[in-house]
Image: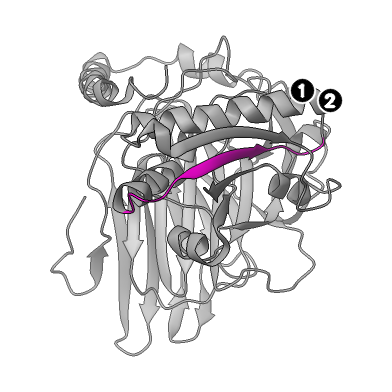
Amino acid sequence: MCFTTSAEAQLLGKLKAKAQDAAERAVIKKTEQKVTNETEKSMDKVLGGKGESTEPVREAANSTGSTVSNEVESEENSGGAETKVWSKYNFVPGDEIIFEDDLSTEENGEFPSRWDLLKGNAENASLNGEPVIKLDKDSYITPLMKKEKYLPEVFTFEFDVYFNDVYHTYQQYNVLFYPGTSGSAVIEGGRLYPLKITMNGAWIQKHDEKTNQQRVFENYLSSSGKLPAWKHVAISYNKGNLKVFLDEDRILNIPNIEIEPGVLSIQAYTVGNNELTSAIKNIRIAEGGKKLYDRVVADGKFITRGILFDVNKATLKPESMGVINEIAALMKEHNDLKFSIEGHTDSDGEENSNLQLSEKRALAVKETLTSLGVDDSRLQAKGMGEKVPVSENTTPEGKANNRRVEFVKI
């Protein structure tokens, strides 16, 4: 993979030219293959951590403790690579999208129009044919929002980050839940540091004013998987509770971090090579809501925007499994529930094509649920196309809110 911009066109050639440690490569390849084989045995039917530390100032965040091979896009067909089910993934995105960046409308070489630059340099670029935001070393960007403090008390934040080969550098992406670009910020009860995302883990630090101690929450997987690669980051914040996922794995689960974030920004950080690729894509912020069963009881249905597909296809993206796994668990717990699965699209494209696509997507969701043990007779699938919008189709957020799957009780 390489950027089409001139600054990055030679990147992978340089990386490939460097000598690799054969012994280290063999160990990692053997580990990856073992994990992949074990995972695929349980996944192929669906679609063709650490404990708390006893140290007083350092806490290992609760996690699943599992290591699963990462999904890597095929270079021949990056939009249609085989999707693997993330069987343990339980991240559920918020109900209403308040920020989503559609990079397909941006011009390469220009600054991304829906962001503000806090430090460094960022520009639109193309990586393996996909639009991305390229970030120079030590650069910070923040979403352009109408409200000064736009994050609600319950929200989710998702984005994809690109990691280079682990043997050539140290690389991370930082998420700041406070204004500005300082290394920390004074908050009520202490001082907060950025959430740091690495290729195989995450950590965040908070200084507790009451105890005068540094509380460090961290967790790492034993393997980062095959690199270079894209990794999906999913963050859930619920009134002081913070969860962080890296691809399928829950890296952090902090029950009471005692912060009230109002804004956020992203920083690209590397050590050792100024020409390394740092890039992000698929950025989405959503406001949270009620549990699925509560919504069924109150409204007779629930709407999810966390079931995602490849562009113009009915191929489920792996991150969709957080919602699908929860729905499967809900239906197993409540055997009386039956649903009509209704797919909806935005208004882009031809109306009849959208109708057919939405039906195929609804069927894909149904097939996935039945493969997870839900009886086929309890599910129907229907395509609604673009006929029933819930938002205007004039903004990225409006279109994203219209692209949804509804589960209507029958």
Q: Position of residue 384 (x, y in %)?
A: 70, 36
Point 75% across, 28% down: residue: 354
Image label count: 2
Q: Position of residue 185 (x, y in %)?
A: 53, 75
Assess whether residue 339 is covered by the magenta stretch: yes
Q: Which mark is residue 353?
A: 1
Instruction: Answer above or below: position of 353 versus 274.
Output: above
* Labelled pair 2, 1 in contact (Cβ < 8 Å): yes
Residue stretch in magenta: 334-347
Q: Position of residue 325 (x, y in %)?
A: 38, 43
Kind of residue sitting beneath label 2: Glu
Point 48% across, 55% down: residue: 235
Q: Which mark is residue 350?
A: 2
When asked about the image quadrant of residue 101, the answer is top right
When asked about the image quadrant of residue 315, the answer is top right
Assess whether residue 342 is covered by the magenta stretch: yes
